[in-house]
Image (tube, rainbow, N blue to C red):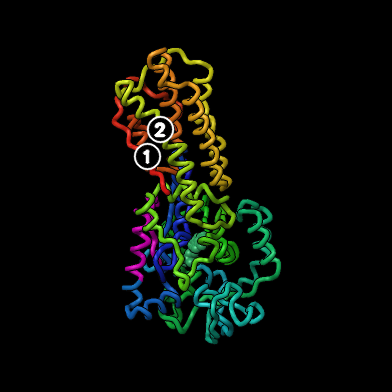
Amino acid sequence: MKPFYITTPIYYVNDKPHIGHAYTSLACDMIARFKRLDGFDVKFLTGTDEHGQKIEKAAAAKGISPQDFVDEISQSFRNLSTILNLTNDDFIRTTEPRHKQAAQHLWNQLVASGNIYLGEYAGWYAVRDEAFYQEDELIDGKAPTGAEVEWIKESSYFFKLSAWAEPLLEYYANHPEAIQPESRRNEVLRFIEGGLKDLSISRRTLKWGVPVPGDSDHVMYVWLDALTNYLSALGYPSDGYQKYWDQAIHMVGKDIIRFHSVYWPAFLMAAGITPPKTVFAHGWWTVEGEKMSKSLGNAIDPVEMVDTYGADAFRYFLLRDLSFGQDGDFSKVTFINRLNTDLANAYGNLCQRVLSFIYKNADATIPTPGEFMPEDKALMAMPKALLPNLRSAIDNFHLHRYGETIWQIIGEGNRYVDAQKPWSLKKEDPVRMATVLYTLCELIRQIAVLTQPILPLASAKILAILSQEKSDFSALEVALKPGLKIDEPQPLFAKYV
Ligand code: ME8
């Protein structure tokens, strides 16, 4: 099986998870699920970023030790995996020994290759961004992101980032797939072309971090520490990490593209490691037209969303409504409309009208079909014929197209029911009724196989009703057996006002 490796950013544990974190994790989960069904050997990683000044400050504000603080909040991110039904294979925390060892090993490689020197940093630091800024970057005394900055002057280790501008540009010229989408790639290339300055990679006044090997007065800059998580979870530096590493896809929000597409590949090249295959930066969610912020208290809580609407509905909306890569706005009205239209009225209705009709009128048994008419054959051939399109939607990160494509077939299914009128066939032509119902069950079965990455819970319910054991994509080719008993179907999706 071909290896496949996908990662979410590791989230800061300064606050509880919100819709933005859920979004990136769900996108990765959708891709990971698809790849597993498509026969890949998948590793899907998520986790938490637990060091740095931001966390140290947040712990101090609560009056507890950083370790107690991170243990508590990291757990809420771990719980989110269960709540969102994520299939991550690992959950890494930067406070774990396996990570600290890997981060220190990488540091030693950078020292050995002559890329680290001791100097003095004098400049601005934004705790919220955990980022250094030059005087000329500030706008009205704040970071370009709007974060407050503070002046820092201390001894610091530096990474010779300036030496890596040319190798990075050359690498990106030869690997167009390495930064996606195109607009982000251009943004990163312009930034590198503007010249790179050496980067401060340690802090002396901070204690909450991974100690710099050989100099316990310093801890590593939290981004160097954090980025290494993608390697530590693969067992780096032990042999064998390359198997997945060569296939690495980092999914991130557009806010952290520079860290992933400038600093990280430069660290890696300097340590003799190939940069990740792809960094994809998706867009930004606002809520009812506003930026999410603590002061507005408008962050959407994924736990509440799942409690109210279920994990499938929340997932479906996020991965279907927004063109993946673009910014989007979460509005309650659009959310409810989409659930009602696509889930309750289209997909839910198709399943419910067919399965409950069989349950009530066809002895709760998948009927044995008579001779298929061309329209039956055409309908049953439709979902499986979509697989190449769906594969390309996933491989090209057009995640919204996945649902869009399948829902066209769901529409076809509902039109077929209306045209064939199985309820009238019951008396007029029972053999034809059996053929129509079988055709519809076969359609629903294939749709349930294909919708697993986007609606895993609903798909599992349908596949269970149809007694399907195998559910990877090879199941598309094995037609449904007639004669199976079905349990009483329950509506799959609620309707909301
Ligand atoms: O940056 N819309 O962690 P973080 C879309 N620890 N996505 C959003 C979002 C929004 N409004 N808000 C957050 C960090 N995200 C570092 C990462 S990786 C080595 C270290 C998502 O907790 C998006 O993926 O601030 C964004 O990049 C990430 O959460 C930032 O999470």
Residue beneath disc 1: 492
* Quadrant the N terminus occupies: top left
Labels in figure, total: 2
Residue beneath disc 2: 351
User: What residue is drawn where x is 54% and y is 46%?
Assistant: 400
Q: Are marks 1 and 2 in contact (CB under 8 Å)?
A: yes
Residue 355 sits above or below residue 222 on the image: above
Q: Please identify the quarter of the rendering in which residue 192 is found.
A: bottom right
User: x, y percentage for residue 140?
Assistant: 63, 81
Residue 292 sits above or below residue 318 on the image: below
Q: Please identify the quarter of the rendering in which residue 451 is found.
A: top left
User: x, y percentage for residue 121?
Assistant: 57, 83
What separation in Å lies between label 1 and label 2 (alpha carbons)?
A: 8 Å
User: What residue is drawn where x is 41% and y is 26%?
Assistant: 441
User: x, y percentage for residue 274?
Assistant: 56, 57
Q: Please identify the quarter of the rendering in which residue 328 is found.
A: bottom right
User: x, y percentage for residue 335?
Assistant: 48, 51
Is residue 105 in view from this perspective? no
The span picked out in magenta is: 70-94
**Within the magenta stretch, is there residue 47?**
no
**Which of marks 2 and 1 precedes in the sequence?**
2
- Local packing at callout 2 (Cα closer than 10 Å; few below 14, some 14-19, many 20+) is many
Q: Secondary structure at mark 2?
A: helix
Q: Secondary structure at mark 1?
A: loop
